[in-house]
Image (cartoon, rainbow, N blue to C red):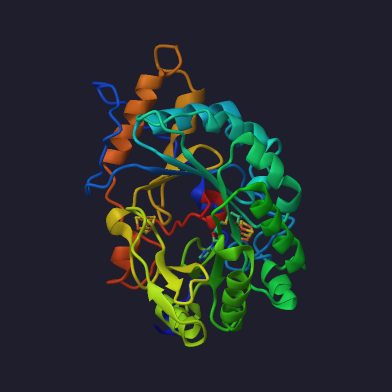
Amino acid sequence: MSERNIIAIVDQRSATAPANALPRIPDTLPAPTGLLSDALGRPLRDLRISVTDRCNFRCSYCMPKEIFDKHHQFLPQSALLSFEEILRLARLFVAQGVQKIRLTGGEPLLRKHLERLIEMLAALRTQDGAPLDLTLTTNGSVLARKAAALKAAGLQRVTVSLDAMDDAVFRRMNDVDFPVADVLAGIDAAVAAGLGPIKVNMVVKRGTNAQEIVPMARHFRDHHGGQVVLRFIEYMDVGATNGWRMDDVMPSAEVRRLIDAVFPLAPLDASQVGETAERWRYRDGRGEVGFISSVTQAFCGDCNRARLSTEGQLYLCLFAEQGHDLRSLLRQPHPSGRTYTDAEITGAIGAIWQDRGDRYSQLRASQPPSTGPSGRRIEMSYIGG
Ligand code: SAM
Ligand code: SF4
Ligand code: SF4
Protein backbone atom coordinates (compact mmCIF):
# COMPACT_ATOMS: atom_id res chain seq x y z
CA MET A 1 0.00 0.00 0.00
CA SER A 2 1.34 3.43 -0.84
CA GLU A 3 1.77 6.63 1.12
CA ARG A 4 -1.44 7.84 -0.51
CA ASN A 5 -3.34 5.85 2.08
CA ILE A 6 -2.14 7.93 5.01
CA ILE A 7 -5.10 9.04 7.08
CA ALA A 8 -4.76 12.63 8.18
CA ILE A 9 -4.34 13.50 11.85
CA VAL A 10 -7.39 15.56 12.66
CA ASP A 11 -9.71 15.62 15.61
CA GLN A 12 -12.98 14.13 14.48
CA ARG A 13 -14.57 14.12 17.92
CA SER A 14 -17.09 16.80 17.09
CA ALA A 15 -18.04 14.87 13.96
CA THR A 16 -18.96 11.90 16.14
CA ALA A 17 -21.57 13.79 18.11
CA PRO A 18 -24.81 11.87 18.50
CA ALA A 19 -27.38 12.10 15.75
CA ASN A 20 -30.59 13.60 17.00
CA ALA A 21 -33.02 11.30 15.23
CA LEU A 22 -34.62 8.92 17.69
CA PRO A 23 -34.41 5.24 16.82
CA ARG A 24 -37.57 3.89 15.20
CA ILE A 25 -39.99 2.01 17.43
CA PRO A 26 -41.59 -0.81 15.40
CA ASP A 27 -45.40 -0.85 15.12
CA THR A 28 -45.63 -4.32 16.60
CA LEU A 29 -43.60 -5.35 19.61
CA PRO A 30 -43.33 -9.14 19.80
CA ALA A 31 -41.65 -10.59 22.90
CA PRO A 32 -37.92 -11.00 22.21
CA THR A 33 -36.83 -14.58 21.57
CA GLY A 34 -33.06 -14.12 21.68
CA LEU A 35 -32.97 -15.35 18.09
CA LEU A 36 -32.54 -12.04 16.32
CA SER A 37 -30.42 -11.92 13.20
CA ASP A 38 -29.14 -9.05 11.10
CA ALA A 39 -29.49 -8.47 7.35
CA LEU A 40 -26.55 -10.84 6.76
CA GLY A 41 -27.92 -13.57 9.06
CA ARG A 42 -25.61 -12.78 12.00
CA PRO A 43 -27.00 -13.15 15.55
CA LEU A 44 -26.53 -10.59 18.34
CA ARG A 45 -24.39 -12.18 21.05
CA ASP A 46 -21.69 -9.80 22.24
CA LEU A 47 -22.18 -6.31 23.70
CA ARG A 48 -19.21 -4.06 24.38
CA ILE A 49 -19.99 -1.24 26.72
CA SER A 50 -17.71 1.78 26.97
CA VAL A 51 -17.93 3.21 30.49
CA THR A 52 -15.65 6.21 30.02
CA ASP A 53 -13.96 8.09 27.18
CA ARG A 54 -11.04 9.05 29.45
CA CYS A 55 -7.73 7.30 29.78
CA ASN A 56 -4.50 7.73 31.71
CA PHE A 57 -2.44 6.47 28.73
CA ARG A 58 -1.85 8.18 25.40
CA CYS A 59 -1.05 5.21 23.13
CA SER A 60 -0.24 6.85 19.81
CA TYR A 61 -2.37 4.38 17.84
CA CYS A 62 -5.44 5.23 19.92
CA MET A 63 -5.27 8.60 21.76
CA PRO A 64 -2.31 10.49 20.32
CA LYS A 65 -1.10 13.16 22.72
CA GLU A 66 -1.21 15.95 20.18
CA ILE A 67 -4.99 15.47 19.78
CA PHE A 68 -5.98 14.23 23.22
CA ASP A 69 -4.23 17.07 25.05
CA LYS A 70 -5.36 19.39 27.84
CA HIS A 71 -7.65 21.23 25.44
CA HIS A 72 -9.48 18.07 24.44
CA GLN A 73 -13.06 18.07 25.66
CA PHE A 74 -14.01 14.78 27.21
CA LEU A 75 -17.66 14.04 27.82
CA PRO A 76 -19.25 15.77 30.82
CA GLN A 77 -20.51 13.47 33.58
CA SER A 78 -24.13 14.26 32.66
CA ALA A 79 -23.61 12.83 29.17
CA LEU A 80 -22.46 9.46 30.47
CA LEU A 81 -24.96 6.68 30.92
CA SER A 82 -25.51 6.09 34.64
CA PHE A 83 -25.04 2.56 35.99
CA GLU A 84 -28.83 2.21 36.18
CA GLU A 85 -29.16 3.22 32.52
CA ILE A 86 -26.40 0.81 31.48
CA LEU A 87 -28.06 -1.99 33.43
CA ARG A 88 -31.44 -1.30 31.86
CA LEU A 89 -30.03 -1.39 28.33
CA ALA A 90 -27.86 -4.44 29.10
CA ARG A 91 -30.95 -6.30 30.31
CA LEU A 92 -32.82 -5.47 27.10
CA PHE A 93 -29.85 -6.54 24.96
CA VAL A 94 -29.65 -9.81 26.87
CA ALA A 95 -33.33 -10.39 26.11
CA GLN A 96 -32.43 -9.93 22.44
CA GLY A 97 -29.75 -12.64 22.60
CA VAL A 98 -26.60 -11.11 24.10
CA GLN A 99 -24.59 -13.67 26.09
CA LYS A 100 -21.35 -11.81 26.60
CA ILE A 101 -20.68 -8.32 27.93
CA ARG A 102 -17.28 -6.66 27.80
CA LEU A 103 -16.65 -3.40 29.65
CA THR A 104 -14.22 -1.12 27.91
CA GLY A 105 -13.39 2.55 27.28
CA GLY A 106 -11.21 4.67 27.46
CA GLU A 107 -9.79 3.01 30.50
CA PRO A 108 -12.75 1.31 32.21
CA LEU A 109 -11.03 1.05 35.59
CA LEU A 110 -11.01 4.86 35.77
CA ARG A 111 -14.82 4.90 36.05
CA LYS A 112 -15.61 5.43 39.72
CA HIS A 113 -17.27 2.54 41.58
CA LEU A 114 -17.08 0.25 38.56
CA GLU A 115 -17.37 -2.73 40.92
CA ARG A 116 -20.94 -1.66 41.61
CA LEU A 117 -21.81 -1.82 37.90
CA ILE A 118 -20.15 -5.23 37.67
CA GLU A 119 -22.25 -6.49 40.57
CA MET A 120 -25.39 -5.25 38.82
CA LEU A 121 -24.49 -6.85 35.47
CA ALA A 122 -23.36 -10.11 37.08
CA ALA A 123 -26.92 -10.66 38.31
CA LEU A 124 -28.31 -10.76 34.74
CA ARG A 125 -29.19 -14.11 33.17
CA THR A 126 -29.38 -15.07 29.50
CA GLN A 127 -32.54 -16.34 27.82
CA ASP A 128 -31.44 -19.87 28.91
CA GLY A 129 -30.97 -18.82 32.52
CA ALA A 130 -27.15 -18.88 32.35
CA PRO A 131 -24.92 -16.15 33.82
CA LEU A 132 -23.37 -13.80 31.29
CA ASP A 133 -19.80 -14.10 30.17
CA LEU A 134 -18.74 -10.86 31.89
CA THR A 135 -15.35 -9.48 31.09
CA LEU A 136 -13.34 -6.26 30.84
CA THR A 137 -10.47 -4.87 28.76
CA THR A 138 -7.93 -2.75 30.62
CA ASN A 139 -4.52 -1.21 30.20
CA GLY A 140 -3.69 -2.86 33.53
CA SER A 141 -2.38 0.31 35.17
CA VAL A 142 -4.52 -0.01 38.30
CA LEU A 143 -5.31 -3.71 38.06
CA ALA A 144 -2.93 -4.74 40.84
CA ARG A 145 -5.03 -2.66 43.24
CA LYS A 146 -8.43 -3.64 41.86
CA ALA A 147 -8.24 -7.28 40.73
CA ALA A 148 -9.54 -8.85 43.93
CA ALA A 149 -12.47 -6.41 44.23
CA LEU A 150 -13.41 -6.91 40.57
CA LYS A 151 -13.49 -10.67 41.06
CA ALA A 152 -15.54 -10.32 44.24
CA ALA A 153 -18.03 -8.14 42.37
CA GLY A 154 -18.63 -10.93 39.82
CA LEU A 155 -16.23 -10.20 36.97
CA GLN A 156 -15.21 -13.46 35.34
CA ARG A 157 -12.20 -12.59 33.19
CA VAL A 158 -9.97 -9.72 32.12
CA THR A 159 -8.08 -8.87 28.96
CA VAL A 160 -5.00 -6.74 29.53
CA SER A 161 -3.40 -4.66 26.79
CA LEU A 162 0.39 -4.71 26.78
CA ASP A 163 2.53 -3.79 23.79
CA ALA A 164 6.09 -4.51 24.95
CA MET A 165 8.20 -6.24 27.59
CA ASP A 166 10.98 -3.71 27.26
CA ASP A 167 10.36 -0.89 29.72
CA ALA A 168 11.67 1.90 27.47
CA VAL A 169 9.59 0.74 24.49
CA PHE A 170 6.49 0.39 26.65
CA ARG A 171 6.92 3.82 28.24
CA ARG A 172 7.26 5.33 24.77
CA MET A 173 4.17 3.55 23.46
CA ASN A 174 1.88 4.53 26.33
CA ASP A 175 3.43 8.01 26.02
CA VAL A 176 2.91 8.83 29.68
CA ASP A 177 6.09 7.11 30.90
CA PHE A 178 4.16 4.30 32.60
CA PRO A 179 6.42 1.39 33.67
CA VAL A 180 5.87 -2.13 32.36
CA ALA A 181 6.47 -3.62 35.82
CA ASP A 182 3.19 -2.16 37.11
CA VAL A 183 1.17 -3.76 34.31
CA LEU A 184 2.91 -7.10 34.90
CA ALA A 185 2.01 -6.77 38.59
CA GLY A 186 -1.60 -6.20 37.49
CA ILE A 187 -1.54 -9.39 35.43
CA ASP A 188 -0.09 -11.31 38.40
CA ALA A 189 -2.84 -9.94 40.63
CA ALA A 190 -5.52 -10.91 38.09
CA VAL A 191 -4.14 -14.47 37.93
CA ALA A 192 -4.04 -14.63 41.73
CA ALA A 193 -7.63 -13.35 41.97
CA GLY A 194 -8.86 -16.07 39.57
CA LEU A 195 -9.79 -13.71 36.72
CA GLY A 196 -8.65 -16.22 34.12
CA PRO A 197 -8.20 -17.35 31.48
CA ILE A 198 -6.48 -13.99 31.07
CA LYS A 199 -5.83 -12.63 27.63
CA VAL A 200 -3.03 -10.17 26.92
CA ASN A 201 -3.45 -8.12 23.75
CA MET A 202 -0.43 -6.71 21.95
CA VAL A 203 -1.00 -4.30 19.07
CA VAL A 204 1.91 -4.76 16.69
CA LYS A 205 3.13 -1.68 14.86
CA ARG A 206 5.95 -2.21 12.42
CA GLY A 207 8.95 -0.04 13.25
CA THR A 208 7.66 0.51 16.79
CA ASN A 209 7.38 -2.76 18.70
CA ALA A 210 7.90 -5.65 16.25
CA GLN A 211 11.15 -6.48 18.06
CA GLU A 212 9.02 -7.17 21.16
CA ILE A 213 7.04 -10.04 19.59
CA VAL A 214 9.37 -12.86 20.57
CA PRO A 215 10.20 -11.46 24.05
CA MET A 216 6.44 -11.14 24.74
CA ALA A 217 5.85 -14.72 23.55
CA ARG A 218 8.74 -15.94 25.71
CA HIS A 219 7.52 -14.13 28.81
CA PHE A 220 3.96 -15.46 28.70
CA ARG A 221 5.10 -19.00 27.84
CA ASP A 222 7.40 -19.00 30.84
CA HIS A 223 5.02 -17.50 33.38
CA HIS A 224 1.64 -18.45 34.85
CA GLY A 225 1.73 -22.05 33.57
CA GLY A 226 -0.12 -21.33 30.33
CA GLN A 227 -2.97 -19.46 32.10
CA VAL A 228 -2.29 -16.28 30.14
CA VAL A 229 -3.00 -16.27 26.41
CA LEU A 230 -1.07 -13.70 24.41
CA ARG A 231 -2.82 -12.34 21.32
CA PHE A 232 -1.28 -10.25 18.59
CA ILE A 233 -3.51 -7.60 17.03
CA GLU A 234 -2.92 -6.03 13.66
CA TYR A 235 -2.76 -2.25 13.92
CA MET A 236 -6.12 -1.03 12.61
CA ASP A 237 -7.29 2.02 10.69
CA VAL A 238 -9.88 2.73 13.35
CA GLY A 239 -10.63 6.36 14.20
CA ALA A 240 -9.25 9.35 12.35
CA THR A 241 -6.53 10.61 14.64
CA ASN A 242 -3.77 8.01 14.64
CA GLY A 243 -2.29 8.70 11.19
CA TRP A 244 -2.73 5.04 10.21
CA ARG A 245 -0.75 3.73 7.24
CA MET A 246 -0.84 0.24 5.80
CA ASP A 247 2.98 0.28 5.88
CA ASP A 248 2.81 0.20 9.71
CA VAL A 249 0.67 -2.94 9.77
CA MET A 250 2.53 -6.18 10.38
CA PRO A 251 0.35 -9.00 9.05
CA SER A 252 -0.41 -11.79 11.53
CA ALA A 253 1.11 -14.35 9.17
CA GLU A 254 4.45 -12.59 9.51
CA VAL A 255 4.16 -12.35 13.31
CA ARG A 256 3.32 -16.05 13.45
CA ARG A 257 6.36 -16.98 11.34
CA LEU A 258 8.63 -15.01 13.67
CA ILE A 259 7.33 -16.88 16.72
CA ASP A 260 7.21 -20.26 15.00
CA ALA A 261 10.91 -19.96 14.12
CA VAL A 262 11.76 -19.78 17.84
CA PHE A 263 8.87 -21.60 19.51
CA PRO A 264 7.21 -24.00 17.02
CA LEU A 265 3.42 -23.62 16.73
CA ALA A 266 0.50 -25.83 15.66
CA PRO A 267 -3.03 -24.57 14.76
CA LEU A 268 -6.01 -25.02 17.10
CA ASP A 269 -9.71 -24.96 16.21
CA ALA A 270 -11.76 -21.85 17.04
CA SER A 271 -13.51 -22.39 20.37
CA GLN A 272 -16.53 -20.18 19.61
CA VAL A 273 -18.40 -18.89 16.58
CA GLY A 274 -17.59 -15.22 16.09
CA GLU A 275 -14.21 -15.58 17.76
CA THR A 276 -11.90 -12.86 16.52
CA ALA A 277 -8.59 -14.63 17.20
CA GLU A 278 -7.06 -17.46 15.22
CA ARG A 279 -5.66 -19.80 17.88
CA TRP A 280 -2.33 -21.63 17.81
CA ARG A 281 -0.60 -23.74 20.48
CA TYR A 282 3.04 -24.19 21.28
CA ARG A 283 4.09 -27.65 20.14
CA ASP A 284 5.92 -28.19 23.42
CA GLY A 285 2.67 -27.81 25.37
CA ARG A 286 3.46 -24.40 26.93
CA GLY A 287 0.08 -22.81 26.27
CA GLU A 288 -1.34 -20.97 23.25
CA VAL A 289 -1.22 -17.69 21.34
CA GLY A 290 -3.84 -15.91 19.22
CA PHE A 291 -3.73 -13.72 16.14
CA ILE A 292 -6.34 -11.07 15.45
CA SER A 293 -6.01 -10.21 11.78
CA SER A 294 -8.51 -7.39 11.56
CA VAL A 295 -6.75 -5.89 8.54
CA THR A 296 -5.43 -8.80 6.48
CA GLN A 297 -8.21 -11.33 7.13
CA ALA A 298 -11.65 -9.86 7.63
CA PHE A 299 -13.85 -11.69 10.11
CA CYS A 300 -17.08 -9.78 9.44
CA GLY A 301 -18.85 -12.96 8.24
CA ASP A 302 -19.77 -14.02 11.76
CA CYS A 303 -19.40 -10.70 13.59
CA ASN A 304 -21.98 -10.78 16.37
CA ARG A 305 -20.76 -7.69 18.25
CA ALA A 306 -22.64 -4.50 19.11
CA ARG A 307 -21.01 -1.53 20.82
CA LEU A 308 -22.60 0.91 23.25
CA SER A 309 -20.72 4.17 23.64
CA THR A 310 -20.22 5.99 26.94
CA GLU A 311 -23.11 8.29 26.05
CA GLY A 312 -25.49 5.56 24.97
CA GLN A 313 -24.99 5.52 21.21
CA LEU A 314 -25.32 2.05 19.70
CA TYR A 315 -22.73 1.27 17.01
CA LEU A 316 -23.04 -1.79 14.82
CA CYS A 317 -19.43 -1.87 13.68
CA LEU A 318 -16.09 -0.58 14.92
CA PHE A 319 -15.94 1.45 11.75
CA ALA A 320 -19.51 2.74 11.80
CA GLU A 321 -19.89 6.41 11.03
CA GLN A 322 -23.15 6.87 12.84
CA GLY A 323 -24.58 5.61 16.11
CA HIS A 324 -28.18 4.97 17.16
CA ASP A 325 -29.22 7.19 20.03
CA LEU A 326 -30.52 4.82 22.70
CA ARG A 327 -29.86 7.33 25.49
CA SER A 328 -32.63 9.55 24.18
CA LEU A 329 -35.07 6.65 24.48
CA LEU A 330 -34.04 6.39 28.12
CA ARG A 331 -34.15 10.09 28.90
CA GLN A 332 -36.62 11.79 26.57
CA PRO A 333 -40.35 11.46 26.99
CA HIS A 334 -42.49 9.65 24.45
CA PRO A 335 -44.61 12.16 22.41
CA SER A 336 -47.53 11.28 24.69
CA GLY A 337 -45.59 12.48 27.73
CA ARG A 338 -44.82 9.10 29.32
CA THR A 339 -41.41 7.40 29.27
CA TYR A 340 -40.51 4.78 26.68
CA THR A 341 -41.26 1.25 27.88
CA ASP A 342 -38.80 -1.67 27.99
CA ALA A 343 -40.82 -3.32 25.19
CA GLU A 344 -40.44 -0.26 22.97
CA ILE A 345 -36.69 0.05 23.56
CA THR A 346 -36.21 -3.70 23.05
CA GLY A 347 -38.18 -3.38 19.81
CA ALA A 348 -36.00 -0.48 18.68
CA ILE A 349 -32.83 -2.49 19.39
CA GLY A 350 -34.26 -5.42 17.44
CA ALA A 351 -35.17 -3.24 14.45
CA ILE A 352 -31.70 -1.66 14.40
CA TRP A 353 -29.99 -5.06 14.51
CA GLN A 354 -32.25 -6.53 11.82
CA ASP A 355 -31.23 -3.72 9.45
CA ARG A 356 -27.50 -4.21 10.08
CA GLY A 357 -25.40 -4.87 7.01
CA ASP A 358 -22.02 -3.58 8.26
CA ARG A 359 -18.93 -5.47 7.09
CA TYR A 360 -16.28 -2.81 6.86
CA SER A 361 -13.18 -5.04 7.03
CA GLN A 362 -14.48 -7.32 4.31
CA LEU A 363 -15.12 -4.33 2.04
CA ARG A 364 -11.76 -2.78 2.90
CA ALA A 365 -10.08 -5.92 1.56
CA SER A 366 -11.35 -4.94 -1.88
CA GLN A 367 -11.25 -1.14 -1.59
CA PRO A 368 -8.62 1.28 -0.34
CA PRO A 369 -9.37 2.65 3.15
CA SER A 370 -11.34 5.84 3.33
CA THR A 371 -13.17 7.77 5.99
CA GLY A 372 -16.42 7.16 4.13
CA PRO A 373 -18.83 9.61 2.57
CA SER A 374 -19.37 11.58 5.77
CA GLY A 375 -15.67 11.74 6.59
CA ARG A 376 -16.56 10.59 10.12
CA ARG A 377 -14.80 7.86 12.02
CA ILE A 378 -15.43 6.79 15.57
CA GLU A 379 -12.39 6.83 17.84
CA MET A 380 -11.41 3.57 19.54
CA SER A 381 -11.19 5.38 22.88
CA TYR A 382 -14.83 6.48 22.44
CA ILE A 383 -16.30 3.15 21.41
CA GLY A 384 -13.86 0.70 23.03
CA GLY A 385 -12.07 -2.27 21.48
N1 SAM B 1 -7.93 1.17 27.70
C1 SAM B 1 -8.24 -0.21 27.60
C2 SAM B 1 -7.09 -0.98 26.99
O1 SAM B 1 -6.20 -0.37 26.42
O2 SAM B 1 -7.14 -2.21 27.09
C3 SAM B 1 -9.54 -0.51 26.87
C4 SAM B 1 -9.87 0.30 25.67
S1 SAM B 1 -8.76 0.10 24.29
C5 SAM B 1 -9.49 1.20 23.14
C6 SAM B 1 -9.21 -1.52 23.74
C7 SAM B 1 -8.23 -2.22 22.86
O3 SAM B 1 -8.14 -1.55 21.62
C8 SAM B 1 -6.80 -2.31 23.38
O4 SAM B 1 -6.39 -3.66 23.42
C9 SAM B 1 -6.01 -1.53 22.37
O5 SAM B 1 -4.72 -2.04 22.25
C10 SAM B 1 -6.83 -1.69 21.13
N2 SAM B 1 -6.59 -0.66 20.11
C11 SAM B 1 -6.71 0.67 20.23
N3 SAM B 1 -6.42 1.29 19.07
C12 SAM B 1 -6.10 0.30 18.18
C13 SAM B 1 -5.72 0.29 16.81
N4 SAM B 1 -5.58 1.41 16.10
N5 SAM B 1 -5.49 -0.91 16.23
C14 SAM B 1 -5.63 -2.05 16.92
N6 SAM B 1 -6.00 -2.11 18.21
C15 SAM B 1 -6.23 -0.95 18.84
FE1 SF4 C 1 -5.98 4.26 26.61
FE2 SF4 C 1 -6.49 1.79 25.88
FE3 SF4 C 1 -6.46 3.72 24.04
FE4 SF4 C 1 -4.16 3.01 25.17
S1 SF4 C 1 -5.49 1.71 23.89
S2 SF4 C 1 -4.89 5.10 24.89
S3 SF4 C 1 -4.80 2.46 27.19
S4 SF4 C 1 -7.89 3.53 25.69
FE1 SF4 D 1 -17.51 -6.59 12.87
FE2 SF4 D 1 -17.26 -4.22 11.66
FE3 SF4 D 1 -15.08 -5.48 12.56
FE4 SF4 D 1 -16.40 -6.43 10.41
S1 SF4 D 1 -15.32 -4.49 10.56
S2 SF4 D 1 -15.66 -7.63 12.16
S3 SF4 D 1 -18.53 -5.94 10.99
S4 SF4 D 1 -16.80 -4.69 13.81
Q: Answer with left or right where residue 254 lies relative to residue 356.
A: right
**How many labels were placed on the picture?**
0
The one nearer the camera, 183 or 339, is 183
The one nearer the camera, 10 or 276, is 276
| Residue 246 showing in the rendered view | yes
Q: Residue at x 41, y 84 (%)?
A: 2
x and y, in percent, of residue 89 in the image: 47, 30
- Asked if 26 appears above or below 243 in the picture, the reply is above
x and y, in percent, of residue 361 in the image: 34, 64
> Where is residue 326, by image quadrant?
top left
| Residue 22 showing in the rendered view | no
Q: Residue at x 56, y 41 (%)?
A: 310
Quadrant including the N terminus: bottom left
Outermost front residue: 284
- Asked if 6 appears above or below 129 in the picture, the reply is below
x and y, in percent, of residue 53 in the image: 61, 48
Quadrant of the image where one finds ligand 3: bottom left
The one nearer the camera, 272 or 53, is 272
x and y, in percent, of residue 265 in the image: 43, 78
Q: Residue at x 27, y 47 (%)?
A: 42
Q: Residue at x 64, y 54 (%)?
A: 191
